[in-house]
Image (tube, grey):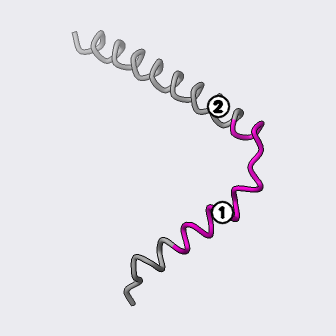
Amino acid sequence: MQASNHTFMGTAGGTFLSVLPNLHSEDVLKTVVLASVGAFVSFTISLILKFFIKKHKK
């Protein structure tokens, strides 16, 4: 069964519009802060691991 683009867009739009009233600014802010912290920690850990791998190879 192949869905048309109109069906997909209607479903995606309806889902977005049904979720939108349930979002609060505190939730969005918390998500942004947690995503930023997660990205920073991930980047820092990858730099540390890269340093240890280079040091271990020598």
**Would residue 55 be found to the left or right of residue 10 on screen?**
left
- Highlighted magenta segment, given as a residue range: 10-28
- Vertical comparison of 36 with 26: above or below: above
Do the residues under discs 1 and 2 have CB atoms within 8 angstroms? no
Find out whether residue 23 is within the magenta segment: yes
Task: Give the crowd class for mark 2: few <14, some 14-19, many >=20 residues within 10 Å.
Answer: few
Measured in 3D between alpha carbons, the distance from the residue under mark 1 to the one under mark 2, in whole angstroms, is: 24 Å
Seen from the viewer's position, the closer of residues 8 and 37 is 8
In the rendered image, which quarter is residue 48 located in?
top left
Which three-letter amino acid code belongs to the residue tagged 1? Leu
Task: Give the crowd class for mark 1: few <14, some 14-19, many >=20 residues within 10 Å.
Answer: few
> Disc 1 marks which residue?
17
Which three-letter amino acid code belongs to the residue tagged 2? Leu
**Would residue 5 be found to the left or right of residue 20 on screen?**
left
**Would residue 6 be found to the left or right of residue 11 on screen?**
left
**From this viewpoint, which residue is outermost toward the left?**
58
- Disc 1 secondary structure class: helix
Residue drawn at (39%, 17%), measured in percent from left and top? 47
Seen from the viewer's position, the closer of residues 16 and 52 is 16
> Disc 2 marks which residue?
34
Where does residue 30 sit, x and y in percent of width and height?
A: 71, 34
Q: Nearer the viewer, mark 1 or mark 2?
A: 1
Image quarter (top left, top right, bottom left or bottom right) of the N terminus: bottom left
Residue drawn at (70%, 33%), measured in percent from left and top? 29
Seen from the viewer's position, the closer of residues 37 and 5 is 5
Q: Earlier in the sequence, mark 1 or mark 2?
A: 1
Where does residue 34 sit, x and y in percent of width and height?
A: 64, 31
Where does residue 43 sit, x and y in percent of width and height?
A: 45, 23
Name the main secondary structure of what is drawn in magenta: helix
- Disc 2 secondary structure class: helix
Residue drawn at (53%, 23%), measured in percent from left and top? 41
In the rendered image, which quarter is residue 15 located in?
bottom right
